[in-house]
Amino acid sequence: MRLLLADDDELMRELLAAVFTAHGHEVESFADGTAIWRAFEAAPAAMVVLDWEMPGLDGLEVCRRIRAHPEGADTFLQVITARSGMHNLDAVLDSGADDYLPKPVTPEEIAARLRIAERRMEIAQARRRAEDELRKARYLAGVGELSLALQHEINNPLAALLTNSALVASGMLAPEETRECLATIDVQARRIADVVKRLHGMDDPRSVEYVKGQRMVDLGDDPGASRRKPR
């Protein structure tokens, strides 16, 4: 994992970097908040560790900027600071940070918090994967429901349209029969056009039961249509 850290205390930077590197992470260190923010802007990282009080931007301002960044919503933010007290913890959490560790810290404490951060990131990634799969499943279900609705609404008028157009094309009909076929073609074409119009105007699609265990998008043109079982 690529990890960014910033602290104006050189010894603290070296301690943090040593622990993170020992656990297999790629670490980039900075001495002030402005530098780490620029590094994040250039290439967002999965985890950022910050001192609160630093030259340039302080740690909480960096947290706020990262959270506002398009790729910063899932970054794990940890603040390590000499400040203590409940009001300081509230300030850290309000800035968007995920974790707070008061100084002085030992390598064991840093490693323990790192394991917690790794576990939380794994859970967050698993949740995102599950949400992506759910969105995909809902999309595919919606495609199936829409396909069934279009078949239900369009198949009959389309079949009538094709039948009558074939009769007209055959040239075997009397003039009156041809006019009747053309009138039927016009009616069925308008029915299909109406379905397309209703489909285009849908802003809150609903589904209704077509047969037991199978649903389709409701393309009804009136409020009661969704409550009527399709014929």
Image: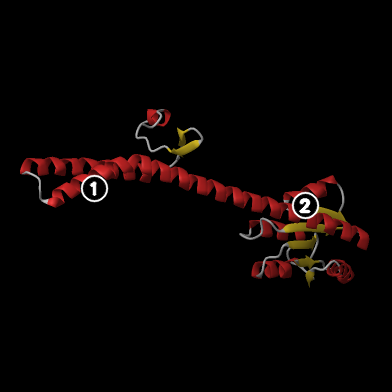
Q: Which residue is mark 1?
A: 162
In the displayed structure image, the side of residue 219 where residue 27 appears, left or right: right
Asked whether residue 211 appears in the rendered view, the answer is yes
**Residue at the image position 79 percent from the left and 62 percent from the top:** 49
101 over 176 or under it: above or below: below
Residue type (three-letter) at the residue carrying disc 2: Val
The mark that comes first in sequence, 2 or 1, is: 2
Label 1 environment density (alpha carbons within 10 Å; few <14, some 14–19, many ≥20): few
| Rendering coords of residue 77 (x, y %) | 75, 57
Asked whether residue 55 appears in the rendered view, the answer is no
**Residue at the image position 6 percent from the left and 43 percent from the top:** 174
Of 139 and 171, nearer the camera is: 171
Helix, strand or loop status at disc 2? helix
Q: Which residue is mark 2?
A: 92
31 over 211 or under it: above or below: below
In the displayed structure image, the side of residue 160 where residue 43 appears, left or right: right
Colour basis: secondary structure
| Rendering coords of residue 53 (x, y %) | 81, 61
| Rendering coords of residue 66 (x, y %) | 68, 60
**Residue at the image position 89 percent from the left and 70 percent from the top:** 11
77 over 161 or under it: above or below: below
**Residue at the image position 65 percent from the left and 67 percent from the top:** 41
Query: Quadrant location of the C terminus?
Result: top left
Disc 2 to disc 1, how far (Cα)?
69 Å
In the displayed structure image, the side of residue 157 where residue 82 appears, left or right: right
